[in-house]
Image (cartoon, helix red, strand yellow):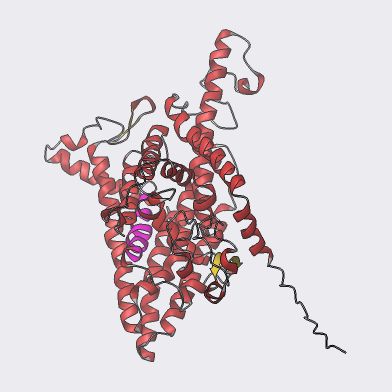
């Protein structure tokens, strides 16, 4: 009797739920594109339309039409509607003001704070799936001239320069408060993104990879995201069939990708060669793991001098009594020495804030004071953090750039806290009770400090230095944490 060979077929294990979500993203590119274009339209309306409307009444509110006790306008007019020609004009003005306030609140009070939070929690899904500038620059690139990317454009320092310049200029023109300034900065960035997309690459996001002002910040924050696209190199190499190259919009070498910093999490590569999958990980894995990429010096500089220096100075000058006292002292000194030109008003709103209709006009002294304040934060706080990190890394015997990554949680939570200050301002103006806010801020700040302290301790512990040197390095590591935490404590609980 002939022998029968029975092959026992073992079906492959089902892919985890997160991996299936990534596969769905790869299959549903049209749905993602539709979402992107909806957000593009929403973004353009949110940024452009308010810039062409009059400034809201100083006492206008988003959810209340009360314009103050001295106003003859019926406080219920927005709800009841117009009853006469006079009422009609007031009714239109009421809803026009609400439209401007809503755009301002949605953009600065909701959009940007939670973009930062989303990067820390889910990686750069915002970039790959939702970002309007990314969608526009890729669209322009698909229909543009497809030029070769020049060497100067690939310089790793552009994200640092772009972040610092846009942050500082935004403070000089009050980008958080006035739609015209927002349109100038954000609209200018969008136009530049489209122009770069049209000139360089073929269906790629050259702007996002090399020039976007927040690309470097997002790259740092994505390193602590607990969700990422994992590359299985063994499965990639063992795949039996040839396959087409991945259509990676930010021009990444997917096969050799080691971390989530540069990945836009668009999902296009999910399932490629049975080696790419959306997966969960420890939020500390990329910083503590030996396989993570060591950041470039420009990334470490952005973290220390940009996110912990320039950004904090930009958040704090508006609420610091020291800033006011210093500016007043400078003004008195100028008057005493008969130097009056620095007290002259700004000649144009796009140079320094100038909105006389609402009583907000900067002088040259105001602009100079803001520049000096932010520069002082960059040099003293950022430079102090740099010196402490370099010293601790030298004592512990590790790369200072890798140790600097331990500050990412504190810097990211600081960005969220700073941007959410605008959210709190809007909520207070609407009469929302915020008694819970100080406690929430305290908890978030404590999480950032303790998380960064633990990460730094773990990095120092495995260093090549001796025990005494590593212990001293751990103490030095606490200095930047104390400095940053102390400044936020002054902002939220003293000033």
Picture layout, residue 493 above or below residue 355 = below
| 363 part of magenta stretch | no
> Percent position (x, y) of residue 455?
47, 75
Comparing 196 with 5, the one in front is 5
Q: Indicate left or right for 331 with 12 as reference.
A: left
> Percent position (x, y) of residue 261?
45, 63
**In percent of the image, x 54 and y 60: which residue is there?**
269
**In percent of the image, x 37 and y 60: which residue is there?**
308
- Can see residue 320? no
Q: Which residues are magenta?
A: 299-314
> Percent position (x, y) of residue 2?
84, 88
Q: Quadrant of the N terminus?
A: bottom right
Q: Indicate left or right for 224 with 181 as reference.
A: right
Comparing 216 with 83, the one in front is 216
Q: Name the residue furthest top.
A: 85
Q: Name the residue furthest front.
A: 1
Comparing 50 with 457, the one in front is 50
**In percent of the image, x 46 and y 49: which residue is there?**
419
Picture layout, residue 83 above or below residue 303 = above
């Amino acid at each position: 009797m002939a022998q029968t060979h029975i092959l026992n077929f073992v079906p492959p294990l089902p892919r985890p739920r997160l991996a299936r979500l990534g596969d769905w993203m790869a299959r549903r590119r049209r749905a993602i594109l539709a979402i992107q274009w909806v957000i593009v339209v929403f973004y353009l309306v949110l940024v452009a339309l308010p810039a062409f409307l009059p400034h809201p009444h100083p006492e206008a509110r988003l959810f209340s039409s009360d314009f103050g006790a001295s106003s003859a306008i019926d406080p219920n007019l927005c709800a009841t509607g117009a009853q006469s020609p006079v009422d009609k004009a007031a009714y239109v003005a009421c809803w026009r003001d609400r439209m401007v306030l809503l755009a301002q609140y949605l953009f600065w009070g909701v959009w940007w704070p939670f973009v930062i939070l989303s990067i820390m929690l889910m990686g750069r899904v915002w970039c790959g799936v939702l970002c309007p500038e990314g969608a526009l620059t890729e669209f322009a690139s698909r229909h543009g001239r497809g030029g070769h990317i020049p060497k100067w454009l690939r310089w790793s320092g552009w994200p640092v320069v772009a972040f610092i310049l846009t942050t500082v200029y935004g403070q000089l023109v009050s980008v958080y408060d006035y739609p015209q300034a927002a349109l100038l900065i954000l609209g200018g960035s969008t136009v530049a993104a489209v122009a770069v997309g049209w000139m360089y690459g073929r269906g790629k996001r050259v702007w996002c990879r090399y020039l976007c002002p927040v690309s470097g910040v997002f790259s740092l924050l994505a390193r602590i995201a607990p969700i990422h696209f994992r590359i299985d190199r063994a499965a990639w190499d063992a795949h039996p069939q040839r396959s087409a190259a991945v259509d990676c919009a930010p021009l990444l070498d997917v096969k050799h990708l080691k971390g989530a910093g540069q990945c836009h999490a668009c999902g296009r590569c999910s399932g490629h060669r049975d080696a790419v999958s959306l997966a969960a990980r420890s939020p500390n894995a990329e910083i503590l793991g030996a396989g993570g990429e060591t950041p470039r010096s420009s990334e470490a500089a952005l973290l220390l001098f940009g996110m912990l220096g320039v950004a904090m100075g930009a958040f704090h000058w508006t609420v610091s009594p020291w800033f006011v006292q210093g500016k007043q002292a400078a003004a008195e000194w100028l008057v005493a020495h008969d130097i009056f030109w620095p007290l002259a008003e700004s000649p144009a709103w796009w140079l320094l804030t100038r909105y006389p209709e609402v009583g907000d006009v900067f002088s040259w002294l105001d602009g100079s004071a803001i520049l000096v304040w932010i520069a002082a934060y960059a040099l003293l706080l950022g430079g102090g953090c740099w010196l402490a990190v370099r010293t601790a890394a030298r004592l512990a015997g590790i790369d200072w750039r890798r140790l600097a990554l331990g500050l990412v949680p504190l810097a990211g939570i600081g960005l969220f806290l700073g941007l959410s200050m605008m959210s709190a301002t809007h909520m207070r103006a609407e009469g929302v009770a915020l008694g819970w806010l100080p406690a929430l801020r305290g908890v978030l700040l404590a999480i950032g400090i303790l998380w960064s302290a633990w990460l730094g301790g773990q990095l120092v512990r495995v260093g090549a230095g001796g025990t005494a040197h590593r212990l001293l390095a751990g103490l030095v590591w606490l200095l930047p944490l104390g400095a940053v935490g102390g400044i936020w404590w002054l902002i939220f609980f003293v000033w």
